[in-house]
Amino acid sequence: MKKSTGLVYSTDKGHICPTCEHPVKQCRCPQTATGLPSDGVVRISRQTKGRKGSGVSMISGLPLNDNELKKLAKQLKKKCGTGGTVKNGLIEIQGDHRDILLKYLTQMGFKTKLAGG
């Protein structure tokens, strides 16, 4: 069992990240907005579940905060000419635009791959 050697909570700053020792809201660790550590790969998938057959392109694994995700989502929506949103650290783009998104995100320097079927 690993013992924690660092500060976990401070009355001044709240919860502290054990890795970078910054307040959790200002954490500098490579994590996605979902709070899960990222493996460095951006995954683009298509999802129709719960959408009555209408598909969306889902982008996950982006190591960006909420504001950066919203800015990127705006660029991607403009590139695809469609709507979309940011939910729980994932970018949803309406329609099946996986090929366009893959090409654009790769040009931006992200390591990307298609996920799912």
Image: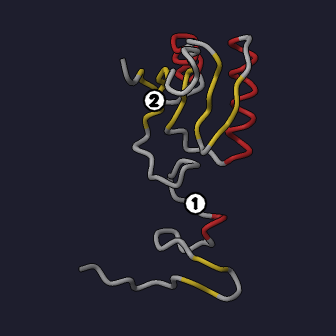
Label number found at residue 43: 2
Q: Which one is nearer the viewer's eye here, 111 or 114?
A: 114
Residue 84 falls in which quadrant of the image? Answer: top right
Amino acid marked by disc 1: Arg
Crowdedness of circle 1 by 10 Å Cα count: few (<14), some, many (20+)? Answer: few
Compared across the picture, whether 24 is left or right of 4 comes to right
Nearer the N terminus, badge 1 or badge 2? 1
Residue at 49% across, 20% down: 46
Tell me the kind of residue under disc 2.
Arg
Could you tell me residue 61's position as x and y percent? 49, 39
Residue indicated by mark 1: 28
In x, y percent, where is residue 103?
54, 14
Residue at position x 28%, y 79% in the image: 2
Which label number is shown at residue 99? Answer: none
Which image quarter holds the N terminus? bottom left
Q: Position of residue 75 (x, y in %)?
A: 73, 24
Residue occupying the far front of the picture: 52
x then y, percent, for residue 15:
59, 77
> For the residues marked 1 and 2, what is the alpha-carbon distance in whole angstroms?
22 Å
Residue depicted at x 45% and y 46%: 38
1 or 2: mark nearer the eye: 2
What element does badge 2 sit on? strand
Q: Is residue 116 above or below residue 66?
A: above
Residue at the image position 55 percent from the left and 44 percent from the top = 63
